[in-house]
Amino acid sequence: MSLSRLVRLTAMLLVPALLSNGLAFAANKPVEPAAMKAKLQARGVGNGVRITLSDDSEAKGLIVSLGDQSFAVKPKGAAQRRRSSMRR
């Protein structure tokens, strides 16, 4: 077997393996409420955040308040805040 043929065979085996690994990480997994709460608390009130909600809408802006089961984000330039739940 020549060197160029060995390189081609190796490439043909590596490409599908690497692509399938990337697809496994691309799946959106629901985040546990406790983990989300910890991440939001670590970031803190008044700091910017971007969150993808369970209905696939996106909330981004400043964290206004953090509760036990919910949080509020105020979009930049908006007068009203958006309240969301940390439930599944």
Image: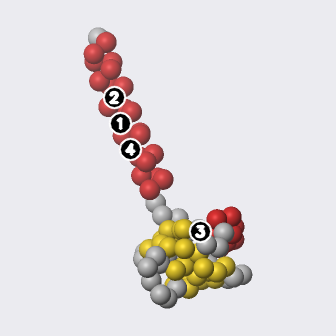
The crowding category of the residue bearing disc 4, from other C-alpha atoms within 10 Å (few below 14, some 14 to 19, many at least 20), is few
Mark 4 or 3, closer to the camera: 3
Q: CA distance from mark 4 to mark 3?
A: 36 Å
Is 61 located above or below residue 24 in the figure? below
Sort mark 2 into few (<14), some (14-19) or many (20+) by Cα contacts within 10 Å. few
> Residue shown at 45%/45% (left/top)?
21
Q: Amino acid at mark 1?
A: Val
Give coordinates of residue 50: x percent, y percent.
50, 68
User: Whole-percent x and y of residue 70?
Assistant: 63, 82
> CA gap, disc 2 to disc 1?
6 Å
Can you give x and y, in whole percent of width and height, for residue 36 in the image?
A: 63, 69
Q: Which mark is residue 19?
A: 4
Tell me which residue sits at (50%, 73%) in the image: 61
Give the quarter of the image for residue 40: bottom right
Which amino acid type is marked by label 2? Ala
Q: Secondary structure at mark 1?
A: helix
Residue 47 is labelled as 3
Q: Which residue is mark 1?
A: 15
Task: Give residue 40's mark.
Answer: none
Contact between labelled residues 4 and 1, with CB atoms less than 8 Å apart:
yes
Tags 2 and 4 touching, CB below 8 Å: no
Tell us which disc is closer to us: 2 or 3.
3
In terms of image quadrants, where is residue 37?
A: bottom right
